[in-house]
Image: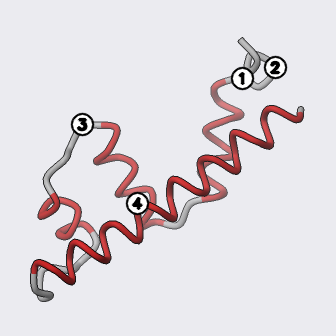
Amino acid sequence: SQYTRASFSEILTMLEAELDETEKKVLWLMLQGERAMPAFAEVLGLTRLDEREQRSEVNRVKDRLAKKLQRLGQRLKRR
């Protein structure tokens, strides 16, 4: 694999440095297979918002997380 040059622990360390606490919580839910928007809204502290606003904010955080993961992958490829 093209990523074998970086150990799993190196990748986790790099990822941890890239993510804020909110993004780490969202990533953890995603890794557990969670798909329900209310679960994400709860960890993000968005339960006071209406459903449309919750969905918008959850998607914004997920998009930001995906972009950070993509950038990390690109940096690993260049190593």
**Residue corresponding to mark 3:** 33
* Mark 3 or mark 4, earlier in chain: 3
Residue at image mark 2:
5
What residue sits right under mark 1 in the picture?
A: 7
Residue at (20% x, 77% y) in the render: 54
Q: Which residue is mark 4?
A: 62
Sequence-first tag of 1 and 3: 1
The three-letter code of the residue at mark 3 reads: Gly
Q: Amino acid at mark 4?
A: Lys
Residue at (81, 19) in percent of width and height: 5
Of 47 and 78, the residue lying toward us: 78
Residue at 80% from the left image edge and 43% from the top image edge:
75
Mark 1 vs mark 4: in front: 4
Q: Of the residues shown, which amino acid type is indicated by label 2?
A: Arg
As measured in the structure, the alpha-carbon distance from the residue carrying label 1 to the one carrying label 4 is 25 Å
Report helix, strand or loop for mark 3: loop
| 75 w.r.t. 25: above or below | above
Q: Considering the numbered disc 2 on the image, is that residue within a helix, a strand or a loop?
A: loop
